[in-house]
Amino acid sequence: MDADVIVVGLGSAGAMACWQLAEVHGAQVIGVEQYALGHDAGGYAGESRLFRTGYHESPEYVPMLLRARELWQELERGGRRTLFLPAGVLSIGAPTIAPMRNVLASVEEHEIPHEVLDAAELKSRFPQHGSITDEIGVLDRLGGVLRPESAVQEALRRARKAGAELIDNAPVAGIEEIPGGVRVSTARGSHTAKSVVVTAGAWAAQLVPELREVLDIRPLVLTWFAPEDPAAFAPEVFPGFIRDLGDVHLFGIPSVDGALVKAGWADAWGSIADPAQLVRFLEPSALAGVGGEVHDLVPDLPAHPSRHSVHMDAYTPDRRAVIGTVRPGVVVVAGLSGHGFKLAPAFGEIAARSALGLPQQHDISRFSPDRFGG
Ligand SMILES: Cc1cc2nc3c(=O)[nH]c(=O)nc-3n(C[C@H](O)[C@H](O)[C@H](O)COP(=O)(O)OP(=O)(O)OC[C@H]3O[C@@H](n4cnc5c(N)ncnc54)[C@H](O)[C@@H]3O)c2cc1C
């Protein structure tokens, strides 16, 4: 065998799996990426990602989120890149809606440092947010902003330093079982290993047919706005936020460059049949729609974005990632469903342990690839 484990797809989860496999477990690793390492077409692109422990999706994620946070800090400590800005994350919404109940349950049940602000406190502490009526704010003090491109690069650097062989510009065309392992074929040659971890993001179903009926590829749009006073949106005074108004889910990230503020809609952009169909720009009318809503809710941000970019992610029907073994020797981490970057180091850790046949530290049954039947 050429290696213990081959990792296919060196984006968010794949970079973390390589790091864990090579550095923590001392495994022989080959990582294969279809594009250049750290390319800008991955699910991680776009400058920043929210990390939050007050979790809208479910408090069940909190132990894994806390583990991910430790790993982010460990990754940052070992290098020279800033990966995490501890700006906090503010969840805003009516206290009765399910996402806010989940946020409150997350921070209370798991004793996460937090503050609950009523509407009056919210308005006076964070006047950047407008039109607050009966909403509350929950400030998650463990939340913050991740720098995804740097994080992927840093994890790959750590993996390479620990001996991983990383191969770029080599799209994997097929994975086949061989006695005692797998063969992974690319246009530039094939490699064998005892097991393979497939972390191919929006492209995963092309390599793992079991995922074809499960993954839905959705475009996601990022929009940046230029406020007159960028200092009012600096990480020290303006936490990341998610505002839930029933039909409208707005998110925002403090200015990481001292000029622009990222804010926009989460999840409102339909789906595509194939990653090749992604259109990487938005019509002006669609930009005006998101800009108008951002301006209504954060009035000091102008109504027209000064920059935008279009990305994609693979979603599962229940918005939980798929993590586990689909066939002997084939481990997948896929369907991170628009909220998986923050968890990527924990997912990488789990994938590494699965690939090496080690027991897990978390209950991962909820992420089982078998849960959708068929
Ligand atoms: C715009 C946007 C905003 C988001 N905001 C947040 C947020 O605030 N917080 C959060 O936690 N999450 C967020 N997410 C979700 C998160 O970023 C994604 O879930 C995550 O990055 C997906 O990681 P992945 O490893 O599955 O895929 P990727 O990071 O895309 O990695 C897949 C890799 O596999 C490679 N690959 C694919 N096919 C092959 C092949 N055949 N051969 C070799 N290589 C291959 C790809 O080129 C790519 O490098 C957001 C996502 C988007 C798109």
Image (cartoon, grey):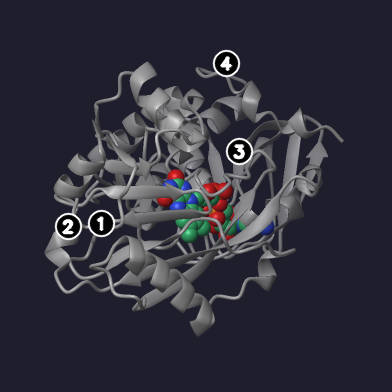
Q: Is residue 125 visible?
A: yes
Amino acid type at mark 3 = Ala
Q: Which of marks 1 and 2 is nearer the N terminus?
A: 2
Check the picture and name the quadrant holding the C terminus: top right
Give the x, y percent position of residue 177: 81, 38
What residue is drawn where x is 21% and y is 58%? 128
**Cβ of mark 3 under 8 A from ligand 1:** yes
Q: How far apart are marks 3 and 1 (CA)?
A: 27 Å
Q: What element carries label 1?
A: loop
As shown in the figure, which amino acid type bears the numbered disc 1?
Pro
- As rendered, which of 40 and 8 lies closer to the eye? 40
Residue 260 appears left or right of 102: left
Mark with earlier residue (4, 1) = 1
CB under 8 Å between callouts 3 and 2? no
Q: Name the residue under label 1.
A: 254
Q: Do the residues labelled 4 and 1 touch (CB within 8 Å)?
A: no
Quarter where residue 305 is shown = bottom left
User: Quarter of the image containing the N terminus?
Assistant: top right
177 left or right, relative to 294:
right
- The residue lying toward the viewer, choosing from 224 and 149, is 224
Amino acid residing under circle 2:
Ala
Q: Can residue 78 be seen in this view?
A: no
Question: Disc 2 designates what residue?
Answer: 234
Precedes in sequence: disc 4 or disc 3: 3
Disc 4 to disc 3, how far (Cα)?
19 Å
Outermost residue on the bottom side: it is: 284
Q: Which of marks 3 and 2 is in front?
A: 2
